[in-house]
Image (cartoon, rainbow, N blue to C red):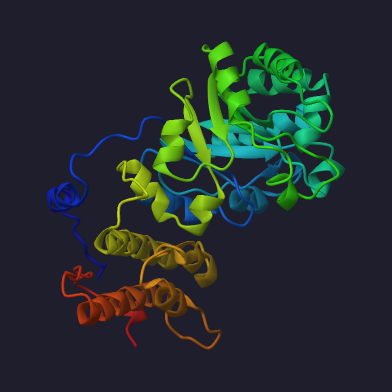
C-alpha cells in the first residue's frame, strides 16, 4: 500500500495567521540560482514543495553533453519532476549550433525557459570559452540569436555587471542592448563584476557589491525583465531590491537553509522568532512521499534523495539531531523513505519531551511493505 498523508490547508493557514498575522504575497518572483551539485532534480522538488511559485534553475549543463552525449546522458542531465511552469534549464557554451541543439533538447524535456550562462568566472568554464568571458565577446550576439530562433521557449541570460576592467555602466548597457536585440527579454544580473583571474569563491566577495547598478539598469530598461542576484537572503533584502525589479535570485542562502523559501513565500520576516517546526515537518513528510515514489521506480539513489533535506531544520534547536538522523551509513539497510520518516519521528519525540507547546504532526498511516524491517 502507498503511504497516505493529507495536508489540511485551512489548519495550516490558521496556524500561520496565529503566528505571523495577516499573510502577504512576496513582492516579486523568487528565483533559485543554478548551483553545481546543489540544484539537483530532488533539491528542486523540495524547493517547489516549500515555494510553489519559485522559479527553479537546473545545475549548469554544458551544451556538448547534450548534443554529443547518448540518450541516457541527456535523460540524466535534463531530469526534472513536477513544477513545469517554473523550470529553467541553464546551459553553458558558445557555439551557435551546439547551443541551439542543446536548447532544443531542454525544450523537448519540458523546461519552459533556457538560460545561457554568461556570468560564471571559474577557470574550468573559461577553459571552455564560455561563462563571464562571453560578455567581452561582441560576436556572441550571433550565437544568442541562433538559440532564440531555434526554440519556442524564452531564452534568458545570467551575467555580471562587468568583467575585469570592463566595468563601466556604458559597457553593461551596451551588452544588454546587443543581447536584447537578439530577442532576449530576461536578464539575471549578479551585482558584482567578474574577475577572471580570481576563483569563484573570491568572486563572491572581492568585487564590490553594486545593487545600485542593477537597480539603475531596471530603471533604464523597464521593457526588460531584470532579476537581481547577489547577497540577497531575507524578506528585507527582497523588499530593498527595489520596485522596478521583475525578480530576485537567491543561491547560497537557499542551499544553507531551504526553509528560507517557505518564509519568503509567506512573507515572514527574519525577525520573526518562530521556528515553524510543524511546517518544516509537513514539508519533510511531503518530500518523504516523493522519496517513496522515486524509490519505487528506481530513479535516484539514497544519497541523492536524502541530501536535499540536510539543512531543512537549520537555525532550529533540532538542526544537528536532524542532520545526524539523515546520515547514510553504508551498512544501513533502510530505504531513504524509512530514514526520512525515522528522522521525522525523532524530531516529534524530541520536541514532545522538551517543548510543551509542540503538537506532533501526523505521520503517514501506512508503511510501504518494501521498507518494513
Image quarter (top left, top right, bottom left or bottom right) of the C terminus: bottom left
Residue 155 point in image, percent of width and height: 60, 25
- Name above or below for residue 44 compared with residue 118: below
The quarter of the picture where residue 126 lies is top right
Residue 54 point in image, percent of width and height: 42, 40
- Name above or below for residue 1 compared with residue 75: below
Seen at 84% across and 37% down, the residue is 129
Image quarter (top left, top right, bottom left or bottom right) of the N terminus: bottom left
**Number of marks present in the image shown:** 0
> Which of these two is toward me, 35 or 236?
236
Residue 112 point in image, percent of width and height: 50, 31
> Which of these two is toward me, 163 or 97?
163
Q: In this view, does 231 lie to the left or right of 21?
A: right
Seen at 44% across and 55% down, the residue is 258
> Which of these two is toward me, 323 or 218?
218
**Residue 153 visible at all:** no
- Name above or below for residue 277 compared with residue 212: below
Residue 73 point in image, percent of width and height: 67, 52
- Name above or below for residue 96 compared with residue 50: above
**Residue 127 visible at all:** yes
Q: In this view, does 301 lie to the left or right of 163?
A: left
Seen at 60% across and 18% down, the residue is 217
Amino acid at each position: 500500500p502507498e503511504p497516505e498523508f493529507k495536508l489540511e490547508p485551512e489548519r495550516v493557514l490558521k496556524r500561520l495567521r496565529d503566528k505571523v498575522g495577516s499573510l502577504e504575497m512576496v513582492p516579486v518572483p523568487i528565483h533559485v540560482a543554478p548551483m553545481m551539485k546543489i540544484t539537483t532534480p530532488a533539491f528542486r522538488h523540495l524547493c517547489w514543495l516549500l515555494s510553489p511559485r519559485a522559479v527553479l534553475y537546473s545545475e549548469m549543463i554544458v551544451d556538448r553533453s547534450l548534443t554529443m552525449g547518448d540518450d541516457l546522458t541527456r535523460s540524466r542531465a535534463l531530469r526534472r519532476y513536477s513544477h513545469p511552469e517554473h523550470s529553467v534549464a541553464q546551459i553553458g557554451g558558445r557555439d551557435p549550433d551546439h547551443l541551439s541543439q542543446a536548447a532544443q533538447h531542454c525544450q523537448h524535456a519540458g523546461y519552459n525557459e533556457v538560460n545561457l550562462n554568461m556570468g560564471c568566472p571559474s577557470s574550468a568554464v573559461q577553459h571552455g570559452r564560455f561563462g563571464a568571458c562571453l560578455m567581452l565577446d561582441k560576436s556572441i550576439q550571433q550565437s544568442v540569436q541562433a538559440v532564440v530562433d531555434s526554440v519556442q521557449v524564452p531564452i534568458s541570460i545570467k551575467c555580471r555587471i562587468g568583467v575585469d576592467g570592463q566595468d563601466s555602466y556604458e559597457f553593461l548597457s551596451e551588452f544588454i542592448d546587443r543581447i536584447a536585440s537578439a530577442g532576449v527579454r530576461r536578464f539575471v544580473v549578479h551585482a558584482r563584476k567578474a574577475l577572471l583571474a580570481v576563483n569563484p569563491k573570491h568572486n563572491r566577495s572581492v568585487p564590490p557589491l553594486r545593487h545600485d547598478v542593477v537597480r539603475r539598469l531596471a530603471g533604464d530598461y523597464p521593457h526588460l525583465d531584470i532579476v537581481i542576484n547577489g547577497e540577497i537572503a531575507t524578506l528585507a533584502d527582497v523588499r530593498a531590491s527595489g520596485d522596478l525589479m521583475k525578480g530576485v535570485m537567491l543561491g547560497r542562502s537557499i542551499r544553507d537553509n531551504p526553509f528560507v523559501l517557505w518564509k519568503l513565500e509567506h512573507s515572514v520576516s527574519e525577525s520573526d522568532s518562530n521556528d515553524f517546526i510543524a511546517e518544516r515537518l509537513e514539508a519533510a513528510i511531503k518530500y518523504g512521499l516523493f522519496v517513496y515514489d522515486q524509490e519505487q521506480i528506481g530513479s535516484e539513489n539514497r544519497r541523492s534523495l536524502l541530501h536535499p533535506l540536510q539543512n531543512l531544520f537549520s537555525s532550529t534547536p533540532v538542526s544537528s539531531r536532524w542532520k545526524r538522523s539523515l546520515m547514510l551509513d553504508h551498512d544501513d539497510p533502510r530505504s531513504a523513505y524509512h530514514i526520512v520518516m525515522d528522522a521525522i519521528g525523532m524530531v516529534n519525540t524530541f520536541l514532545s519531551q522538551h517543548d510543551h507547546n509542540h503538537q506532533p504532526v501526523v505521520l503517514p498511516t501506512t508503511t510501504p511493505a518494501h521498507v518494513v524491517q
